[in-house]
Amino acid sequence: MKLSIVIPVYNEADSLFQLHQEIDAVLQANQYEAEILFIDDGSKDDSWKIITQLAEKDSQVGAIRFRRNFGKAAALNAGFKAATGDIVITMDADLQDDPKEIPGFLEMMETDLDVISGWKKIRHDPWHKTFPSKFFNAMVSWVSGTKLNDHNCGMKCYRREIFDEVTLYGELHRFVPVLAAARGYKVGEKVIQHRARQYGHSKYGFERFIKGFLDVLTVKFVTGYGQRPQHLLGSIGLTSFVIGVLTLLYLAFRWSLFHLFGLGPEYVLHNRPAVLYAVALMLLGAQLISTGIIAELFIAYQNRISNDYSIKEWIRANND
């Protein structure tokens, strides 16, 4: 079984030599057949220069260099496409992930698991990073239904075939276990050691949590309604449309009372803001239903060239 270690790199020149030494020590001690893939995501320091030096000295090292910074998801996606191993391990280049955890991941992969996500149970980060992270992880677990304590952990282990079905884009790299679970793959979790950052500074700020919340909504839609968007959009649209129609019928009834029995001016329609709200609800409902129909047509066309299911085993009939 061959192992591929995919490492996104962005301005981590100070840590690369040490990281390579630690990984190589683990590979040699366990006699793993492995490749180490560094993905330089448009670094502006000497990261690429150091990576090329490592590749010259170690035949296990491969590398990809982006023309500019495209983001971690793009770097991982490129690494997954280039990986040739049966098992793929991802880890960050900042030395916070300990390569000594690799054998433990591989032992767990000998069970029926397909994805193992690292859990930095004891973190060496300031409270203003750990507290929002706990809230974010709880929210993702609740919304997605995939219960993990640390969705953000960069150290994860996958079976290679997962990436024939799961494609990364945007900021969805942290949600690969969720996307894989939605395809029927079995997801587990492993407690790992978290080491304090030795060099540089974190690439993430508060905006990560805003983007993360929006990504959660995207993942929930993709995993829950990716093949049936009308069930969500149509349901909301139909509810909005029906409420708008019922409100207009009620207002029409009040208007008829005004004309038939000469009731007060409060029964006149143009004095009622509810008329505008009812019309707006009807228009919103019609738009959502129309959008759902268009989305269904798109999905129907897409399914002509791709599958909306995942096959684990296949026993072919012998007709000879």
Image (cartoon, rainbow, N blue to C red):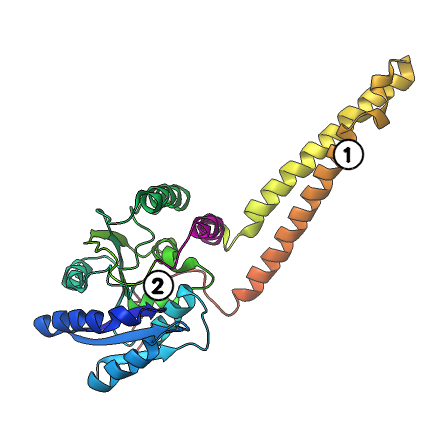
Position of 221 with respect to 153 (left or right) is: right
Q: Nearer the viewer, residue 233 or 35?
A: 35
Q: Which mark is residue 311?
A: 2
Image position, residue 244 (x, y; %)? 71, 34
Q: Which residues are magenta?
A: 202-224
Residue 152 covered by magenta stretch:
no
Q: Determine the main secondary structure of the stretch shown in magenta.
A: helix
Q: Is residue 9 above or below residue 201?
A: below
First reached walking from the N terminus: tag 1 or tag 2: 1
The total number of labels drawn is 2
Tell me where residue 136 sits by quadrant: top left
Indicate the amino acid at tag 1.
Leu
Label 1: state its secondary structure: helix
Q: Which mark is residue 276?
A: 1
Dot 1 and dot 2 residues touching (CB under 8 Å): no
Q: Nearer the viewer, residue 67 or 101?
A: 67
Q: Quadrant of the C terminus?
A: bottom left
Indicate the amino acid at tag 2.
Ile
Position of 134 with respect to 32 (left or right) is: right
Image position, residue 204 (x, y; %)? 39, 56
Q: Nearer the viewer, residue 22 or 146?
A: 22
Residue drawn at 17 percent across, 58 percent down:
108
Q: Is residue 36 visible?
A: yes
Residue drawn at 35 percent across, 73 percent down:
39
Q: Quadrant of the N terminus?
A: bottom left
Image position, residue 79 (x, y; %)? 35, 72
> Alpha-carbon neighbours of circle 1 within 10 Å: few (<14), some, or many (≥20)?
few
Q: Is residue 137 above or below residue 173?
A: above
Image position, residue 237 (x, y; %)? 64, 42
Tell me where residue 143 sits by quadrant: top left
